Image (spheres, helix red, strand yellow):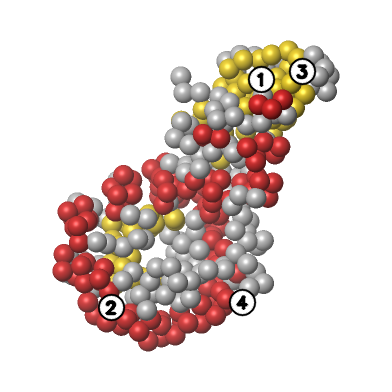
Amino acid sequence: MVPLRLTVDRAALARNWRWFRDRAGVPAAAAVKADGYGLGARLVVDALFAAGARSFLVSTFAEAAALGPPGEGADVVVLHGFAAEEAPLAASLPWARPVLNTGRQVRAWASAFPGRPADLMVETGMNRLGLAPADAASALVAVPVETVHSHLATADEPANPMAEAQLARFREIAAACPGPRFSIANSAAVCRGPAFALDLVRPGLGLYGGVPHPAADVVPVVTLAARVLQVKPLAQGDPVGYGAAWRAPGPARVATVNLGYADGIFRALGPALLFRAGDRRCPAVGRVSMDMLAVDVTGTDVAEGDWLELGFDVPRLAAVSGLSQYELLVSLGRRFERVAA
């Protein structure tokens, strides 16, 4: 028996994707890189394909291969581009196309796959990946381009005007390069308003229950569950865990569960962890260990072998821990059995 479960609420995931699509008023791709933000890319893609999504974003061709075909009429977009040595792998994935980020990538793709479509990334101010704007027109001649992308550095900062400045630069590029679709909006940018929608949006964090912007209307997607390894009765003053950091304030029952920082439940999250035993909320107590933590189950009938649920409220946990919402999601470990509900 696997003692850890990660349950993805397919209805919630689909509901969040539809919210971004409808808010934007244009087609919405879905970012499923890093194994679906840690939740299981295949599970996520199947749920979103059923909801109507037809374009999925991964980082590398290796991720595209691990995902497999996304579904009839759907495609996978590889954000980190293409290198010549990846040609055999790319040839085996006809439903995947790269986002070409450099002149070298453009030349390599045009040589390996003449006439096969790709996307482009154009730099507008983030200075991460992307062609210089002056090189976009020649790239459009070299390869058939489906979509021209750019990426915003500060979309999640409502008071920062940099996003509008990047959008203005991107609109200038679009005006000079008619033909393909243009896309700049991630989850946060969709929330900033219709000006950012252009032809296609690319929500990621918001799909999974993260809140990328105050205007986002998303619902939680993830629930964790851990098996109880042992339950101990404690007297007042008895310590629990490393450093004896917590002592029972009175007679208590404490359950040790099979969950810890090796599973992405970091020490900084400890004070914010609230488990559920039936209709009772049970706080974590003491320090989180590598693969165990303790839960105060006083007043419940929790016993060895039972399961305790942990709602994974991403924005709340990020606020308490100081970790980003992205980090919390992608750090959920491989020991979880990932299931859909």
Q: Tell me the CA gap for discs 2 and 4.
A: 30 Å
Which residue appears at 33% of the width and 46% of the height?
Answer: 67
Q: Which residue is mark 1?
A: 255
Can residue 144 be seen? Answer: no
The residue type indicated by label 1 comes to Ala
What is the crowding at mark 1: few (fewer than 14 residues within 10 Å), some, or many (at least 20)? many
Q: Tell me the CA gap for discs 3 and 2.
A: 70 Å
- Left or right of 78 in this view: 30: right
Q: Tell me the CA gap for discs 1 and 2.
A: 61 Å
What is the crowding at mark 2: few (fewer than 14 residues within 10 Å), some, or many (at least 20)? many
Q: Say which of marks 3 and 4 sits in front.
A: 3
First of labels 3, 4 by sequence position = 4
Can residue 59 be seen? Answer: yes
Q: Say which of marks 1 and 2 sits in front.
A: 1
Q: Say which of marks 3 and 2 sits in front.
A: 3
First of labels 1, 4 by sequence position = 4
- Left or right of 198 in this view: 274: right
Q: Which residue is mark 4?
A: 161
The residue type indicated by label 2 comes to Leu
Q: Residue 281: horizontal and vertical position, in percent?
A: 73, 30
The residue type indicated by label 3 comes to Asp
Q: Residue 191: horizontal and vertical position, in percent?
A: 59, 65
- State which quadrant residue 103 falls in: bottom left
Which residue appears at 19% of the width and 70% of the height?
Answer: 110
Q: Which residue is mark 3?
A: 238
Q: Secondary structure at mark 4?
A: loop
Q: Tell me the CA gap for discs 1 and 4.
A: 50 Å
Which residue appears at 26% of the width and 68% of the height?
Answer: 105
Q: Which residue is mark 2?
A: 140
The residue type indicated by label 4 comes to Pro
